[in-house]
Image: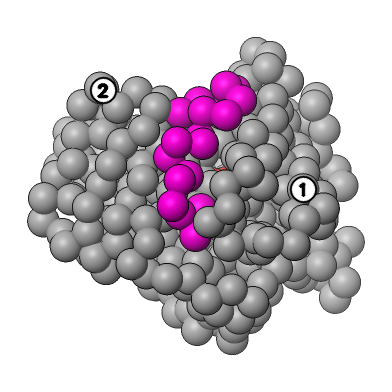
């Protein structure tokens, strides 16, 4: 158990990211000094929104140049911090070389940050942004979980370098983190394991997170003939930020935390938008049949391999979020609010 002093600075790696930006906002609003580690602090397109957030908050932000693949590059940013939020990790699925583009930065980057925590005496707790992807790969994996529901006890055993390498990268990175934590006794690891994150982006124009690309597909006509009833979990980005904050500052927080608000599917995510946006945007109205997806899916999107369709379409996702509700006192926004707020940002920013 570690009591974290809110008057000390905290490090956020990948501070400009979709999820991290909301965490930075929360920390700044609480009056906390944020050490924001980013790849390029000169790139205003990527970090300008964080500077703006700091102007309107009581906390202060300081930028540091850091790269997951450069050993020691988080050391300066970590000085004086009791708490480290390690969110940086590549999140995209269109990859040519998964080892180089996903696994190396996720795993070696996590080792880089945590080995630095071993060297910086002030660190008491590291909150790692892991993922439900470290728990499962396909919705069908839920059926193999005890009682058919994913819990914090379950680990992903089905992703590989060749199949869903992003999930593989998150699994290996979280395992590496627990391994490194176990070898020392000064700092404690707590993980937040979000399902698919939706919700308004603070920097939608410059954001490359996979979350936004799926949202765009719902609204730009890609799914106008229908959406697959593809089972996933969804959680609001603002709730994910809150979960990180609670994991950082709740003295008793420990272990992994499934951070997933709704057991849902792609079609339902589109359908909750219909009452407000259905007249003006080509949102999906019906389910695409699985047999059709099996035929055309692999040609439309290389992610939609037959194996992926078989294991996910018309297969319910089920995760148990009771631990985070009970132990960190988390509540979650309704799906409709999350989807409407996300979609409105794409409209306001003229992205769709
Ligand atoms: N979005 C989701 O649905 C979801 C769900 C579960 C878990 N997560 C996890 O949440 C975290 C944030 O994801 P996100 O959705 O916010 O995606 P994002 O906006 O793409 O953020 C990823 C962050 O990682 C940084 N990064 C990537 N490669 C790096 C490298 N080699 N060195 C330093 N920084 C690097 C990016 O920096 P640049 O901007 O410079 O590229 C960016 O700040 C990730 O750990 C992701 O796995 C996301």
Instruction: Using residue 106 as the reference point, say whether residue 287 is left or right of it.
Output: left
Answer above or below: position of 177 versus 189: above
Question: Along the horizontal axis of the image, is 31 left or right of 172?
Answer: left
The residue carrying pointer 2 sits among few (fewer than 14), some (14 to 19) or many (20 or more) residues within 10 Å by Cα, namely few
Q: Residue furthest left?
A: 56
Give the answer, above or below, for where 126 lies relative to 331: above
Residue underneath mark 2: 43
Q: Position of residue 293 (x, y in %)?
A: 65, 34
Give the residue number, with chain letter if any, for mark 1: 180
Q: Quadrant of residue 146?
A: bottom right
| Callout count | 2
Q: Residue at x 37, y 62 (%)?
A: 8
Picture coordinates of residue 54, whole percent (x, y): 18, 50
Q: Is mark 2 within 8 Å of ligand 1?
A: yes
Q: What residue is shown at x 15% (from left), y 59% (from top)?
A: 57
- The span picked out in magenta is 66-84
């Amino acid at each position: 158990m570690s009591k974290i002093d809110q008057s000390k600075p905290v490090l956020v790696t990948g501070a400009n990211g979709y999820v991290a930006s909301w965490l930075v906002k929360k920390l700044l609003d609480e009056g906390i000094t944020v050490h924001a580690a980013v790849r390029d602090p000169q790139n205003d397109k990527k970090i300008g929104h964080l500077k703006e957030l700091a102007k309107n908050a009581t906390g202060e932000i300081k930028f540091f140049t850091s790269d997951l693949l450069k050993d020691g590059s988080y050391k300066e940013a970590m000085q004086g911090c009791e708490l480290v939020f390690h969110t940086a990790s590549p999140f995209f699925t269109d990859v040519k070389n998964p080892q180089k583009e996903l696994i190396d930065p996720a795993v070696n980057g996590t080792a880089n940050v945590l080995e630095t925590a071993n060297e910086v005496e002030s660190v008491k707790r590291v909150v790692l942004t892991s993922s439900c992807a470290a728990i499962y790969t396909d919705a069908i994996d839920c059926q193999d979980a005890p009682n058919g529901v994913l819990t914090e006890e379950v680990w992903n055993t089905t992703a590989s370098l060749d199949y869903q390498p992003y999930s593989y990268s998150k699994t290996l990175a979280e395992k590496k983190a627990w391994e490194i934590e176990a070898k020392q006794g000064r700092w404690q690891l707590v993980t937040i394991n979000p399902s698919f994150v939706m919700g308004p982006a603070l920097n939608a124009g410059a954001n490359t997170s996979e979350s936004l690309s799926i949202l765009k597909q719902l609204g730009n006509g890609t799914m106008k003939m229908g959406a697959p009833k593809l089972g996933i979990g969804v959680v609001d980005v603002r709730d994910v930020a809150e979960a990180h904050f609670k994991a950082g500052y709740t003295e008793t927080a420990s272990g992994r935390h499934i951070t997933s608000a709704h057991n849902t599917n792609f079609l339902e995510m589109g359908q909750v938008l219909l009452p407000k946006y259905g007249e003006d945007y080509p949102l999906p109205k019906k389910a695409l049949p699985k047999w059709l997806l099996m035929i055309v899916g692999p040609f439309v999107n290389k992610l939609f391999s037959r194996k992926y369709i078989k294991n996910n379409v018309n297969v319910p996702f089920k995760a148990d979020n009771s631990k985070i509700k009970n132990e960190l006192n988390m509540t979650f926004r309704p799906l409709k609010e999350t989807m409407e707020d996300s979609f409105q940002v794409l409209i306001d920013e003229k992205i769709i």
